[in-house]
Image: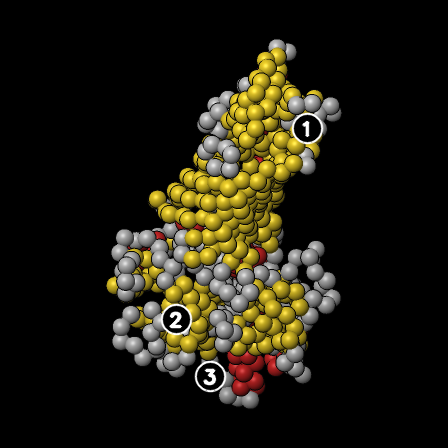
């Protein structure tokens, strides 16, 4: 009966969260075009206005773009209307207001207005032919096709036309960056229109007018950096600005850069791809691998300055003729200057390693293997790094001699084209030293043993869906002095997690974890002892003068953890979850030490338990760079906490930690420490620590 109630409550919770998630998914964001004085061109402000009255008309926009929804173009002949990202007001009068404000603040005319009741000498006619967000999956742009006319109201004839058709690349897919870029584009083109208008009307007053003047803008170029307004809840508007240096891969695997003020004084180091809060002013950035790229920028109050890349990215992956990844070392040279940018090494992504990105000045580069010098005519390959582009190079070497067999960026797409579904099957061989106190609090048992681990991971990642399945099967044998060889490590650990992402760092999750083992477990001692086992019915059985006692049957205890709730992604490597959980400890012939009287040890069979309550968990896979080396210490942690609803039940805690340090090729040093607290099993925190040398081979990926 209690099981049925638990299942019903769990299903109701999932349904409730699903309903809530649907409501959150429909949350709409509204955007406005807003006048930004920081973008004004002081050289265009007139000391004396022209003696004309000018009416600014509402912008003319085709019906397909004159919508509340922001228009997204994902292919040449297809557009979509974003129902969750909307204009807060009609775009047509919004753009007209921007242009009117610019004309007024620049003091261009004696009078500028929108009122049709007032008499005007000229009218500004605005035509927005295209206004769309271009989304090509990995590349984004703001597209504006825009016309401005100056019309003489006496004869209703156009006297000047300015035309612009621009695609400005965006370095992020956030709609707020698109809106700010459109805002800047409208203002930039209005400045050009004002400049031509002033020139035309001054010439006319001087008797040099030549009739209608047509002005066009370069359809592809843009000379200014882009700005994104910062959320008012994050920063002090009066004094703070923000800087963003774009990335092409993962911020953890791209080099950091250094910020200096206008006097050359060091300000701070920063990571590419992250926002940096700065005081307004001019700064010098030293960017890239070896910080060989210099860029001067200016930070404005209440703005995020997005640096336009004048560099390129390069990743180098090394494989053998069987397409297995190889950790072969190479050196990277600038082909023109022969300057070395340093050494790199191929990685094995199946072992949790990641290819690091080089950030380089544009040009041709030479990749040299096997410690050869720049001048070598063997074991090298060249590649061009282009401005703003990511080049993904694959180098193929012989798996025995490590000699170069071939190289090129075309192989990257053929061998390692991105897939939403990834599988890894690894086989680990461990020789280790362990200690644990799961029998008595102050008694630690040390032993050395050899074990084998089968480690399978499957990840499906297609935004907004994320599903991971992790299964670890571990079997190990121990041989201690005075004790026969026996199975001492026997574990099956299965973790299933599904996350539906609502926002970038927020979503809902559901999980199902199972922990069990295959073989019966025995207590083995050097000396003969007297034992008593008491089952759940109270029947006792004595085992006298024996060195071996069975305390666990096959597959039991079987621990099942089910949970659902809210998922918070704290950063790229760390997630926090909170929700409703159900834990079921299914026990059968599972005995724990109850007491000791003289030389007799009494073991009592543990009953099955079922607990419901509020759960929280912290999961992280954190790479820790080691100074003066190319290595990283990989820390994996998983912390689970369950607070049962039943006030008579205590908190359950499980905390799993592993630290892995690569040593040489497939060999690494791993330290694992697990801590658990379950009052029904032990009235103290059980610590299980293990250190071992690991050899890993990739079975499939």
The 10 Å Cα crowd at callout 1, few under 14, some 14 to 19, many 20 or more, is some
Visual colour scheme: secondary structure
Q: Is residue 691 visible?
A: yes
At 64% from the left edge and 75% from the top edge, which residue is drawn?
Answer: 266
Q: Secondary structure at mark 2?
A: strand
Residue marked by disc 2: 331
Which one is closest to the eye, mark 3 or mark 2? 2
Q: Mark 2 vs mark 1: which is more N-terminal?
A: 2
Pick whichever, 635 or 16, lies toward us. Answer: 635
**Quarter of the figure with the N terminus:** top right
Image location of residue 659, percent across then percent down: 54, 50
The 10 Å Cα crowd at callout 3, few under 14, some 14 to 19, many 20 or more, is few
Q: Which mark is residue 531?
A: none
Which one is closest to the eye, mark 1 or mark 3? 1
Pick whichever, 416 or 479, lies toward us. Answer: 479
Residue marked by disc 3: 210
> In the image, is residue 640 above or below residue 14?
below
Image location of residue 381, percent across then percent down: 30, 70
Q: Which mark is residue 679?
A: 1
Snapshot quadrant of residue 58: bottom right
Pick whichever, 598 or 585, lies toward us. Answer: 598
Q: Mark 3 vs mark 2: which is more N-terminal?
A: 3
């Amino acid at each position: 009966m209690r099981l049925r109630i638990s299942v019903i409550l769990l299903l109701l919770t999932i349904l409730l969260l699903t309903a809530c998630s649907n409501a959150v998914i429909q949350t709409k964001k509204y955007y406005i075009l807003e006048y930004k004085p920081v973008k004004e061109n002081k050289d265009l402000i007139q000391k004396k206005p022209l003696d004309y009255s000018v009416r600014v008309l509402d912008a003319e926009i085709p019906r397909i773009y004159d919508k509340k929804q922001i228009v997204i173009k994902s292919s040449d002949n297809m557009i979509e209307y974003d129902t969750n990202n909307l204009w807060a007001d009609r775009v047509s009068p919004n753009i007209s207001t921007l242009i009117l404000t610019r004309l007024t603040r620049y003091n261009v005319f004696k009078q500028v207005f929108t009122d049709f009741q007032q008499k005007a000498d000229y009218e500004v006619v605005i035509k927005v032919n295209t206004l769309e967000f271009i989304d090509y999956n990995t590349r984004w742009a703001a597209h504006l096709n825009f016309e401005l006319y100056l019309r003489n109201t006496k004869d209703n004839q156009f006297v000047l036309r300015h035309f612009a058709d621009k695609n400005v690349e965006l370095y992020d897919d956030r709609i707020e960056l698109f809106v700010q870029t459109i805002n800047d584009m409208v203002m930039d083109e209005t400045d050009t229109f004002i400049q031509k208008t002033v020139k035309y009307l001054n010439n006319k007053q001087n008797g040099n007018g030549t009739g209608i003047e047509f002005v066009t803008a370069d359809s592809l170029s843009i000379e200014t950096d882009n700005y994104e307004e910062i959320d008012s809840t994050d920063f002090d508007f009066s004094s703070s600005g923000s800087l963003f240096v774009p990335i092409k891969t993962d911020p953890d695997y791209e080099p950091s850069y250094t910020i200096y003020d206008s006097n050359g004084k060091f300000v701070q180091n920063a990571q590419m791809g992250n926002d940096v809060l700065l005081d307004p002013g001019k700064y010098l950035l030293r960017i890239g691998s070896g910080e060989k790229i210099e860029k001067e920028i200016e930070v404005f109050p209440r703005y995020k300055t997005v640096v336009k890349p004048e560099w390129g990215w390069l990743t180098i992956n090394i494989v053998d003729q069987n397409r297995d990844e190889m950790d072969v070392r190479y050196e990277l040279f600038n082909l023109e200057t022969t300057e070395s940018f340093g050494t790199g090494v191929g990685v094995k992504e199946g072992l949790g390693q990641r290819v690091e990105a080089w950030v380089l000045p544009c040009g041709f580069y030479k990749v040299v293997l096997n410690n050869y010098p720049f001048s070598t005519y063997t074991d090298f390959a060249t590649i061009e790094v282009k401005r703003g582009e990511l080049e993904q190079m694959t180098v193929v070497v012989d798996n025995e001699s490590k000699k170069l067999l071939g190289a090129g960026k075309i192989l990257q797409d053929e061998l390692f084209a991105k897939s939403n579904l990834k599988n890894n099957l690894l086989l680990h061989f461990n020789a280790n030293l362990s200690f644990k106190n799961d029998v008595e609090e102050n008694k630690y048992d040390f032993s050395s043993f050899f074990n084998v681990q089968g480690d399978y991971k499957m990840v499906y990642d297609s935004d907004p869906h994320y599903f991971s399945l992790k299964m670890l099967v571990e079997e190990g044998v121990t041989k201690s002095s005075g004790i026969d060889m026996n199975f001492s490590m026997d574990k099956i650990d299965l973790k299933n997690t599904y996350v539906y992402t609502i926002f970038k760092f927020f979503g809902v999750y559901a999980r199902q974890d199972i922990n069990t083992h295959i073989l019966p477990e025995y207590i083995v001692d050097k000396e003969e002892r007297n034992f008593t086992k008491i089952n759940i019915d109270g029947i006792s059985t004595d085992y006298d003068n024996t060195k071996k006692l069975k305390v666990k049957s096959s597959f039991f205890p079987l621990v099942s953890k089910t949970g659902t709730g809210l998922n918070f992604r704290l950063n790229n490597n760390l997630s926090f979850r909170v929700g409703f959980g159900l834990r079921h400890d299914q026990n059968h012939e599972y005995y724990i030490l109850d007491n000791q009287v003289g030389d007799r040890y009494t073991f009592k069979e543990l009953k099955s338990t079922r607990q419901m309550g509020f759960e929280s968990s912290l999961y992280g896979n954190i790479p820790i760079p080691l100074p003066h080396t190319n290595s990283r210490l990989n820390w994996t942690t998983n912390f689970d906490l369950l607070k049962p609803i039943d006030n008579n039940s205590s908190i359950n805690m499980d905390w799993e930690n592993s630290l892995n340090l690569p040593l040489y090729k497939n060999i690494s040093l791993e330290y694992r420490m697990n801590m658990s607290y379950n009052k029904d099993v032990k009235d103290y925190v059980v610590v299980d620590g293990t250190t071992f040398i690991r050899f890993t081979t990739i079975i499939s990926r």
